[in-house]
Structures are given as C-alpha cells and as structure tokens.
Image: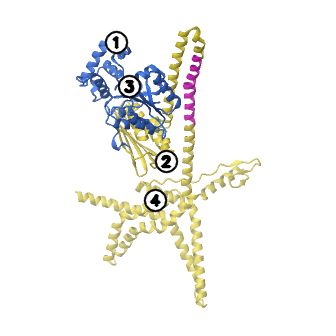
Chain colours: A yellow, B blue
Amino acid sequence: MGATGGLVRWGAAVGAGWWRSAVLVALTCPFALVAVPVGWAGASLAYGWSAGSAAAWPLRALAVFGETLLVLLWVSVAVWTVHPFTSRALAGAARRCAARWLGLELAVAYRQPRQVTRMATGFWWDGQEYHRSEREARRRARVHARFHDPQLHGDGVWLLAAAVTVLPVAALPLLALVLGALLVPGRPPLGAALLAAGLLAAPFGWRVLGPVGRRLLGPVASTRLGWRVAELEEIRADLTQTQAAELERIERGLHDGAQARLVALGMSMGAAEHLVDSDPAAAKRLLAEARANSAGALAELRALVRGINPPVLVERGLVDAVRALALDAVVEVDVVTRVPARPERPVEAALYFSVAELLTNAVKHARAERVGIELSYAERTLTATVSDDGSGGAAAAPGSGLDGVRRRMAAFGGRLEIDSPLGGPTRVTVAVPCELS
Amino acid sequence: MRIVVAEDLFLLRDGMVRLAEAYGHQVVAAVDNGPAALEALLTHRPDVAIVDVRLPPTFSDEGLQAALTARRAVPGLPVLILSQHVEQLYARELLADGLGGIGYQLKDRVLDAGQFMDAVQRVADGGTALDPTVVAKLLGRPARADPLAALTERERSVLALMAEGLSNAAVAARLFLSEGSVSKYTTTIFAKLGLADAEDTNRRVRAVLAYLAVERGPDPDGR
C-alpha cells in the first residue's frame, strides 16, 4: 500500500517535472532560437568568403577573426532586436512559474509612462521631446517608458543567462527521454539507460529555476533603490508628522495645565498680599489655594514629563523601565529580560513606548488576565515580545496603536510581527537592529 | 536630630536645611552629588538622611544607589528619598531589606513643612513614610495569591495609611473612625498577616512590607 502510494507520488513528480521542464525550455529558448540559426547562417556565409584563399596564414587567420566578429555582431543585433518585444513577457511568465512552483515572490515594477503636458506654445511635452498632438506625445511617452526601462533590460539579462543555465539543465531530462526512445529499437541498452536517466532526472531538472531566478528575476538595483527612497520618504514624513504632533501635545499640556495654574497662583498670591492686613483669614485661605495650585502644576508637569521621557527610562534604562511598567499595570505581568547592556537612547525610547502601547492593548482591548514581556538581544537585534491570553484579533489597521508601533519601529529599520488569531492568544514582537553601549 | 541632606538644586537644598534647623535639628552635611552623599552617609551616620534620587554627576539614580549602598553598610540607616516621581520599582528596592527606617516621597511634599517634618521624624524613628501616590499604585496592583486577599476593603485602607506612616490616631482622623476601632482593625490585620506577637513598631513596618509583597531585589540577570 505504502509502496504503491510512493510509486504514485513519484510518478506524479516525474510527470510534473517533465511538464515544468518543458515550460522552462519554452520560456528560456527564444534567444537561443534566434541566435543559433542566425549564427549558423552567418557563419556559413561569412566563412565562405575566405575559404579556399591561398594567402599567407597570418592573413587568413586575420580574415577568420574578422568574420567571427561579424557573425557575433549579427547574432547580437538579432538578439537585441528580439529582446525588447519578448523579454518582459517571458520574464513575467518565469516569475509566475517561480511563484507557483517554488513560492518565490519576486515583485518587480516597470516604468510607467510619464504624464504629457501642454506647453504655452501649444506643443505637447512627453518628458523628452515636444510633439504637435497629444496623441503623438502619449504614444511616444508609452514607447519610451516601455523600451527605456531598466527592468526590461534586467529581464533581457535573465533571458541571456537562462539560455545558458536554465535551458540546458531543464532540457536534459527531455532530451534523454526523446533520444532514449529513438535509440531503444536500434541499441536497446543505451536507449534504456537514457530513458532511465530521463525518468530519474525529471523531478529535479526544473529546480534550476530557483537559484538562477532568485538572482536574476528580482527587481533591478535601480528599482530597488527607488523603492527604498520611497520607503524612506514615507518614514521621514511620518517622523516629521509625529514630531509635530508631539510638540503640539506638549505645548497644549503646558499651556492648559502648568502655565494656567501658575497664572492662578500669581493671582491668588497677589490677592493675598492685598488682604494680609485687612482680612488675614481670607489671605490665609488664598495662600492655601495657591499651594494647592502649585501642587497641581507639579502633578501636571510630572505627567507631561512621563509622556516625553519616562524618568525610570532615563535613570535606569529599558529593562528597569519595562519592569516599572509591569508593576504599574493592573494585571499580572511577567517580565523576562536577557539584555546585557543599554542600547542607544533613541532606540531605547522607541522600544519602551512600543512595549507600553502593546501592554495597554493587551489590557484594554484584549482584556488579558496575564501578560508576558520578554526582552532579548541577539545577532545585533533587540527584540521585545509581548504575549497575552486575551481575546486576540489584533491587527495593525491604519491609524491604530499597532500601526503607530509599526511606524515607530520602521523609523529605526525595525519590524513588527503580529500573531493574534481570533480568541487569542496574542503574541506581538518588535525587533530593532542596534548596538548596545 | 542629626540630618544629612543630599540635593543638587541649591534652592531646595537650602530650603530643607533651613526647615530642619527651624524645627531644631542639626544638619551635619548638605551635599549636592552622589559620591559626596554616600561619603556623608557613611562618615556621619546621621539620625536621618534626606536624599534626592537623581543627583550629579550622571543624573541617573545616583542618590538612590548611594542610599542603598549606605544601608547595606549600615543596616537600617534611616533614609528619606525624595523624587520628582515615585515608582513602585524603587519603593520595592528600598524596602527589600525589611528593616524599616525608609521614606519615599514626592518632592511636592516639601511644600507642606509640617507634614514633611513629620515624615522625617517617622523615618528617623524606624518607621516608613511612603508617598500616598506610590501606596495608591501598590493598592491598584492585582492581588491574587496574596496574603492581602484575606483583608477586607476597610482593613486594606487602614493598612494603606499605615504604609504612608500614619499613627493610629492619624489613621482614625483620616478615615473618620474612632482610635479604638482603628486599633481593632490593626490587630485584625496583624493577625491575618501572621504578625500577632511582634513588638508594635516593628509589626507595623512588617505589615507594610507584607503589604508591598516586596521582591528580594532585582533579578541578577535583569541588568
């Protein structure tokens, strides 16, 4: 039973292998299909010119060299002509195969046509040239984006490389099979051996797509750079916005809180000064009020400072600050730490506020009864994991607290991972690359 | 009493020195940084020290560390810690040796001279004077497998005020009870916490410590 099952599975693997090899051959052969006939025809034509010449051998060698160069030129021109029209489609198909067969996600971006604009002169500007009509400008912009695209040339490089790597390897099982089938009637042993080799190699040949595709099917360097720039711009915008919001919060806190209380303080003391001779009892009352106001101002300043830079974080660093946070929580929080030293201050603060947010989420939204916080440092990465037994279903929806954590981490090149099935338990991890002091 | 003051803000330090002298105490040293504070604590061995948590040169928790180090060298050396903020974490560290003679208060409390000097006196006498803020935080803590779970709401509030360092009379005034019923409550509390036969001051301190369920210092691999 098990043997039959294994045989069936193996048969399926062989069948799928042949199919995949055939697909890969089809997807990688066009350059070879162009290059080989052109090279063949070119060679038979060009080498014919010097054939039968009776010149001295150095001259003949020179002629053959020149003819070889010429043939190479023809081959290159032929491939270069085919490339713009085939590379994108073929590379796209190869990417889909890689995604389906190997789970290899290779996202790439092609250049988009530029917007055309009408100039004051009545001409249309496509980013490169002026045109009389909008239609013409649009067409040229489309053509330009299509054929002057670094990703297109990247795809061409893939096809060139695949023609000498993926193509032969993927073709081998098929060739062995066909040759074997042809040879069996004439030379049975060799034919059978080739057939067997084809069968054995079939499940493996197509896998060459993995290593080659990983290197050559991904986005080209300039697109990657573009993405990184876009990402950094987003982070910068975020940071600027966060900073402005934070300053506004502090300003409001000072303005509505401490500042107002100090004004009240000054007023009651002024009034008390007036009354101290005529109505000492009232003056006393006013002074008591003033003292209450000063205490209130201090309390407000304290709360404000805690939100800007928590005192324990300043005095003791991340580990003790998180332990203090755990002590102040209304539920049971276990803290486990394996962090040998303090990280850089900004990273420390970002991580602290992230953990604080995650703890609040666990208590408030997930209504957890037990929360575990784990801090660790390994491979130059500081990791904080907050797990709880709450209701789960946490997600970083835009504008949510978790989204804030994600942004905070992104600013330091860190990441946020959420594992929170509905019904719990939840496990959220934040990790930042950093050095310890 | 002989008092050591360690505070880096000149105005506050000067104010506390004057206050102490106005109450008839002797300030044997007034210092403005951590190392000097530790030295003053160890050489003068004052009846009570008033120490700011955050001191130069590092402006981290130098004052607290100086106090903890001094108390390791001189067990039970009375110290009143002042800070702009109060943390359960620090309160636990201060109380961890279980010896009493510990105060931990917000700097704001200095504003009320009478209450502040009361707190200083209580600490000097080997009691505790915890800031109501930190006591409130401890009260908000989840009480699970906790000896305190056995206490009633009323008993918990009496214990909270004891943690602040109030005497039975003061607790009675605060809770609008008669002194007799407060002393009944304290007896029940001591019984429930298994402190029935210790001497009274000591018992009060230990009840407070039980209340705080003090951990034995920070975990060694914690930092």
Tag 1–tag 2 contact (CB < 8 Å): no
Q: Of marks 1 and 3, which one's residue comes earlier in the chain?
A: 3
- Callout 4 secondary element: helix
According to the picture, the residue beneath numbered tag 4 turns out to be A214
Q: What separation in Å lies between label 1 and label 3 (alpha carbons)?
A: 21 Å
Image quarter hosting the N terminus of chain B: top left
- Callout 2 secondary element: loop
Q: Chain of mark 1?
A: B
Tag 3–tag 2 contact (CB < 8 Å): no
Location of residue B214 by image quarter: top left
Q: Amino acid at mark 1?
A: Leu
Q: Amino acid at mark 2?
A: Gly
Looking at the rendered structure, whether the residues under marks 4 and 2 are on a common chain is answered as yes
Q: Nearer the viewer, mark 1 or mark 2?
A: 1
User: Which residue: 57% across, 65% down?
Assistant: A82
Nearer to the camera, A132 or B166: B166
Tag 4–tag 1 contact (CB < 8 Å): no
Q: What range is drawn magenta here?
A: A244-269
According to the picture, the residue beneath numbered tag 2 turns out to be A413
Nearer to the camera, A93 or A433: A433
Q: Is A262 colored magenta in this rendering?
A: yes
Q: Of marks 4 and 2, which one's residue comes earlier in the chain?
A: 4
